[in-house]
Image: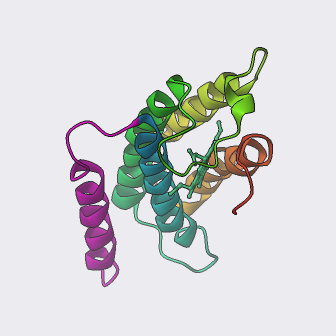
Amino acid sequence: MKRIPIFAAILATTLLSTTAMGDVPSPIARRQAGMKTIAEQMKILGAMTRIGGSFDDFFAQSAFEIMQDAARSAQAGFAENVQTGEATRAKPSIWAEGSDFNARMVRFLADIDAAVAGEPTDQASFIPLFAVVSENCKSCHEHYRAPKT
Ligand code: HEC
């Protein structure tokens, strides 16, 4: 039970950071904020995969649900071809004809939806759902995220 206040604090700051963004975030700010929130939830979830680590079904479910919203928000931020105005690492190929980026985003959302619907109750049911979601990150970044400058 000792872990709960820590998870709760992380959840609270995550909610604050996604709502306190100003009225109309730019597409770049929107997709980056979405990705940042996704990464924060992955950290919370990753901690629950550790052998001997404690699994909490309520916090796992909450983290997947926050990711679900954040991923949809990020998807909306990628819908428009905006590459200037703010620093961005999104590669122009995202918006090129024949790009498979949208399909990757749709699959990512479907995998998160499956994790939410799966409602894992213990580490054994949680880890495969987490693994499927986490497979999306690196392969998309390799193709569509420019290296840090
Ligand atoms: C469909 C493609 C795609 C998937 C899937 C994806 N990302 Fe991203 N991600 C991107 C792109 C493109 C950027 C660069 C956005 C920009 O700078 O405008 C990005 C940026 C980021 C950033 C930097 C955000 C910032 O503050 O600038 C983080 C962190 C991140 N992704 C984490 C993740 C994690 C964790 C996952 C998996 C759970 C994931 N991403 C899945 C495409 C993807």
Q: In terms of depth relative to the viewer, which is nearer, 62 or 85?
A: 85
Task: Specify whether residue 62 is painted magenta.
Answer: no
Q: Is residue 86 above or below residue 9?
A: above
**Residue at x 37%, y 47% (from the top left corner):** 66
**Residue at x 55%, y 32% (from the top left corner):** 109
- Residue 35: x and y in percent read 51, 49
Residue 73, quarter of picture: top left
Total residue callouts: 0
- Residue 108: x and y in percent read 61, 35
**Residue at x 57%, y 48% (from the top left corner):** 88
On the rendered structure, is 117 left or right of 97? left
Q: Is residue 6 above or below residue 141?
A: below
Residue at the front extreme, as displayed: 85
Residue 119 visible in rendering: no
Q: In terms of depth relative to the viewer, which is nearer, 143 or 117?
A: 143
* Highlighted magenta segment, given as a residue range: 1-26
Q: In terms of depth relative to the viewer, which is nearer, 4 or 20?
A: 20
User: Which colour scheme appears in the figure?
Assistant: rainbow
On the rendered structure, is 22 left or right of 25? left
Residue at the bottom extreme, as displayed: 2
Residue 51, quarter of picture: bottom right
**Residue at x 57%, y 36% (from the top left corner):** 83
Q: In terms of depth relative to the viewer, which is nearer, 107 or 99?
A: 99
- Residue 121: x and y in percent read 46, 53
- Residue 60: x and y in percent read 43, 57
Q: Quadrant of the C terminus?
A: bottom right
Q: Quadrant of the N terminus?
A: bottom left
Residue 137 visible in rendering: yes
Task: Specify whether residue 23 is painted magenta.
Answer: yes
Report the magenta stretch's main SS: helix
